[in-house]
Amino acid sequence: MTSLQSSTRRTAGQSASAGRRGAQRSDADLRRDLATSRPLVPTATIGGVIAAGAPLLVCLALAVVGWFLTDAGGEGTPSGALRVGAHGWLVAHGSTVAVEGIRITAIPLGLTLICAWATWRVGHRVGESVSGHGPDADRIADGERDWTVPLAATLFAVGYAVVGVLASSLAATAASSPAPARVVLWSLLIGGLVGGAGIAFGSGRAAIWLPVIPAVVRDVALVTRRILGLWFVISLVALAIAFVLDFSTAANVVSQLHADGGAVTLLIVLTAIVLPNAMLFSSSYLVGPGFTVGTGTTVSTGAVVLGPLPMFPLLAALPDQGPTPGWTGWLMVLPVLVAIVVAGRVQRDRPVLAWDQAAIRGCAGGILAGVVLALLTAFAGGAVGPGRMAEVGPFTFEVLLHAIASFGIGGVVGALVVCWWQRDGDGWVRTRLAGSARLLRRRQR
């Protein structure tokens, strides 16, 4: 992260320069100033274009490679393959697309995460390049307003959105008809929020702003982040175990597709870009409400009702239809245990001896984690095909209720238990040990 120069350092440098009239500045100083004081408007705008264009070019290249792998260019045209790649990038940015008259609304969150990661990296570099603009660290600490990051983030988001509009217009056909308004909205969100955060950290402003946030807010955010991080790991592990236990079904699906090496490679790529979606499906199952894989179907710890499914290998992770084993109901205890562990560890690392403060921190962090999980779950499903497959996804509202209750209760319990231990537990243990020692000495006498 680029650090802002303090006014003391600048003043000292200016005094030394004035004392050495005619002396040249060192090459390192000149290079640093040039690297951190590049023109803000073109740097931020071009950065947004690069952040959007780089993943788009990768999608276009993968589409052309996939076209050659599937039929060696025997069918279709290179322009058609490029259009498919552009539609993949657009769908990752919330656009719907029609395939043979079937409207696809599901978002491949893996591809969206790749775009967000690229945006963060480019935004960080842009932040380093414009960190020399605006007031220094001391003047910002004194309350002087600094518009460097807001202006750079706005220009960055505009550049990102322009690429989205161009991609929508170039890839649009009468049959596919993407949704440019949704692409612009997602582009502004990714470019403005993710890119803006990267610019703030790269420019060093985040290091100045974050300590100003009240400690209780930072602690609640820490509880939320750790709960979600641990919960996503558990959901992913559960998905992997379910898939491995029924791997023979996935292999059977691949064999029935008569897929060659190129087609298998494409299946692996498709599986990778929808893996975050599958993880959120697994999360919904573990939380309790479950999800649907077609109209009239239900997959939850209490019941499994399935119908005809598309031949996609990842669906082998689904449980068998019929009555569920009795132990599956205990899976709903997992989110409570996760919140207990996380809230307890935060209370241990950042002790708060007031009961109400510990309870509020654990409860607020758990509730916020449930809300964030539900928001992410809302983007996991959508229409993926005709007929029954127009309704695929977790039960978002039920996930919200279950996650808030589970994480909130677990957060309160974990924080209060560790708080009690910090307040009275150590003293109780010391008292018991002292009493045992006295009793032992009496017996020895």
Image (cartoon, grey):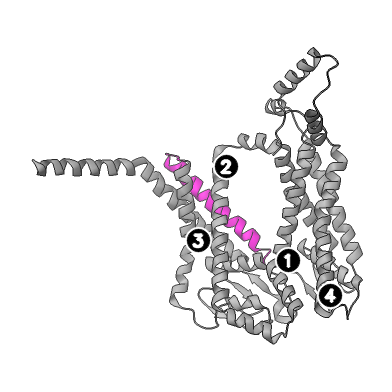
Q: Amino acid at mark 3?
A: Pro
Query: Tag 3 or tag 4, which sits nearer the N-term?
Result: 4
The residue nearer to you, when weighing 230 against 416, is: 230
Q: Are marks 3 and 1 in contact (CB under 8 Å)?
A: no
Between marks 2 and 4 in the image, the one whose residue lies nearer the viewer: 4
Image quarter for residue 180?
Answer: bottom right
Type of amino acid at the residue the image marks with label 1:
Ile
Q: Disc 1, disc 4: CB below 8 Å?
A: no
Horizontally, residue 136 falls left or right of residue 441, namely right
Q: Amino acid at mark 2?
A: Arg
Q: Is residue 414 left or right of residue 310?
A: left
List the residue tagged with mark 1.
107
Please tell me whether residue 365 belongs to the stretch shown in magenta: yes
Q: Residue 335's mark?
A: 3
- Read off the residue under disc 4: 68
Residue under label 2, please give it.
Answer: 218
- Type of the residue with mark 4: Phe
